[in-house]
Image (spheres, helix red, strand yellow):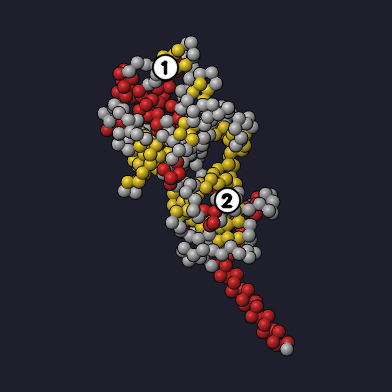
């Protein structure tokens, strides 16, 4: 009898070990991970995973202590680069062992999300899922998510995730097709690239790039001319939301940047050539009875839609305009299914202003995203380079001006 009990016990142990081994084995591509009777913790899933370089960085840093300060009931998602991704990014075991624990923690915190994002959470979503990382920028802040609030939240770096045909995209770029491991307190998503936090504002990235000199100069001159003609009655500042404001508050936005080649192809060799467009129409004036601006600049019409056309939203000379929505859309959200009818500027605090809605029609052509102002008879702009990530959101480089119907170059 004693031998029989020992035999049965051995079978049970073997079965348990086999089950746990299967739980940690990489899942075949496309296989759904079971989510029932989860006893595995996220840390146990990481320890049993084959991602040795991520684990080496974790062990050398202080991630266990950092996560413990969040409490034992807070779920997390780990975006775990494979060993091949670490090596391709220059983070070999030798480099990891020479890197300061603080820097390693910074890298890992950027790969750790303050939420449990499971496979089921991602399946069937049309739009990206915004996810807050555990990595803050102590020099920046964001407005609280309450209309009209005068308080601020700390700035945390974000990741935008979407699952398309079994492929995970992060911030618009592919991150592989590995199936996640579900734990009782979070999810481990293997990815095939190291994620790099953005370090520049949109304005700094545009200036440093070197391809957008005419676009930047034209905006500066538009600002100066419009302000001079209208005595500053209506705000006209290209840098708004492209840099933190006076108290280091960040707004989330994106830009369709125009390279110099596009100006040259349209016949504009200098910014003076472009500014000459303003000679064909009366310049803006001020109605001092209503303190409103009459008319606009042709050069604003030429490039205004590259900032989503929000400068054309309703503006009350006494009370201003509605509140702008975040529009830091990555390339895989640039579809009519996601953005048609999206409210870029709302009706204001009292709901009395006409809202400003998405002005674009999006299509796919030979794998590239194209954008056209709704109703325009001008060629659609094609995105040449997408998802240049910044602190505010992405820059998309386009090959045409995005202008309304019958605009004359």
Residue 341: image quadrant is top left
Q: Please state if 373 lies on the left or on the right of 139 as rendered.
A: left
Q: Residue 203: x and y, percent? A: 45, 32
3D distance between C-alphas at marks 1 and 2 = 50 Å
Q: Indicate the quadrant containing the C terminus: top left, top right, bottom left or bottom right.
A: top left
Q: Is residue 106 left or right of residue 90?
A: right
Left or right of residue 63: residue 245: left
Q: Which residue is rendered at x = 47% and y = 38% of the image?
A: 342
Task: Pick whichever, 65 or 75, lies toward us.
Answer: 75
Which quarter of the figure has residue 188? Answer: bottom right
The residue at 46%/63% (across/down) is: 30
Where is residue 187, by image quadrant?
bottom right
- The residue that disc 2 covers is 112
Residue at the image point whose x is 63% and y is 64% from the top: 38
- Residue 260 location in percent, x, y? 33, 32
Q: Name the residue under label 1.
A: 294
Query: Horizontal and vertical percent for residue 376?
Result: 33, 33
Q: Tell me residue 375's x, y (percent).
A: 34, 34
């Amino acid at each position: 009898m004693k031998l029989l009990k020992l035999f049965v016990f051995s079978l049970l142990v073997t079965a348990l070990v086999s089950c746990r081994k299967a739980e940690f084995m990489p899942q075949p591509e496309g296989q759904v991970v079971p989510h029932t009777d989860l006893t595995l913790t996220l840390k146990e899933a990481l320890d049993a995973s084959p991602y040795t370089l991520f684990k080496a960085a974790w062990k050398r840093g202080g991630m266990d202590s950092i996560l413990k300060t969040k409490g034992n009931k807070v779920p997390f998602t780990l975006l775990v680069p494979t060993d091949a991704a670490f090596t391709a990014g220059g983070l070999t075991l030798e480099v990891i062992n020479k890197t300061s624990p603080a820097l390693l923690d910074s890298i890992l915190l950027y790969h750790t999300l303050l939420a449990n994002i499971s496979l089921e959470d991602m399946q069937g979503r049309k739009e990206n899922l915004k996810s807050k990382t555990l990595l803050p920028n102590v020099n920046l802040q964001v407005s609280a998510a309450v209309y009209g609030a005068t308080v601020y939240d700390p700035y945390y770096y974000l990741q935008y995730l979407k699952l398309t045909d079994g492929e995970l995209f992060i911030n618009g770029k592919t991150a592989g097709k590995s199936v996640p491991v579900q734990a009782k307190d979070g999810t481990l998503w293997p990815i095939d690239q190291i994620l790099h936090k953005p370090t520049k504002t949109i304005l700094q990235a545009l200036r440093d790039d070197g391809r957008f000199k005419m676009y930047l100069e034209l905006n500066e001159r538009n600002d100066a001319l419009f302000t001079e003609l209208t005595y500053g009655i209506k705000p006209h500042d290209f840098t708004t939301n492209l840099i933190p404001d006076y108290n280091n508050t960040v707004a989330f936005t994106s830009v369709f940047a125009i390279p110099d080649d596009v100006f040259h192809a349209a016949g504009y060799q200098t910014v003076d050539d472009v500014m000459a467009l303003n000679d064909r129409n009366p310049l803006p004036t001020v109605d001092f009875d209503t303190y409103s601006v009459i008319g606009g600049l042709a050069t604003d019409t030429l490039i205004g839609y590259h900032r989503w056309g929000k400068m054309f939203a309703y503006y009350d000379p006494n009370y201003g305009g509605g509140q702008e929505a975040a529009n830091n859309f990555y390339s895989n959200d640039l579809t009519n299914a996601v953005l048609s009818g999206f409210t870029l500027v709302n009706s204001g605090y009292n709901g009395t202003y006409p809202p400003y809605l998405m002005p674009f029609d999006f299509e796919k052509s030979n794998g590239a995203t194209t954008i056209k102002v709704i109703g325009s008879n001008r060629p659609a702009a094609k995105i040449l380079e997408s998802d240049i990530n910044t602190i505010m959101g992405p820059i998309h480089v386009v090959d045409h001006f995005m202008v309304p119907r019958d605009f004359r170059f």
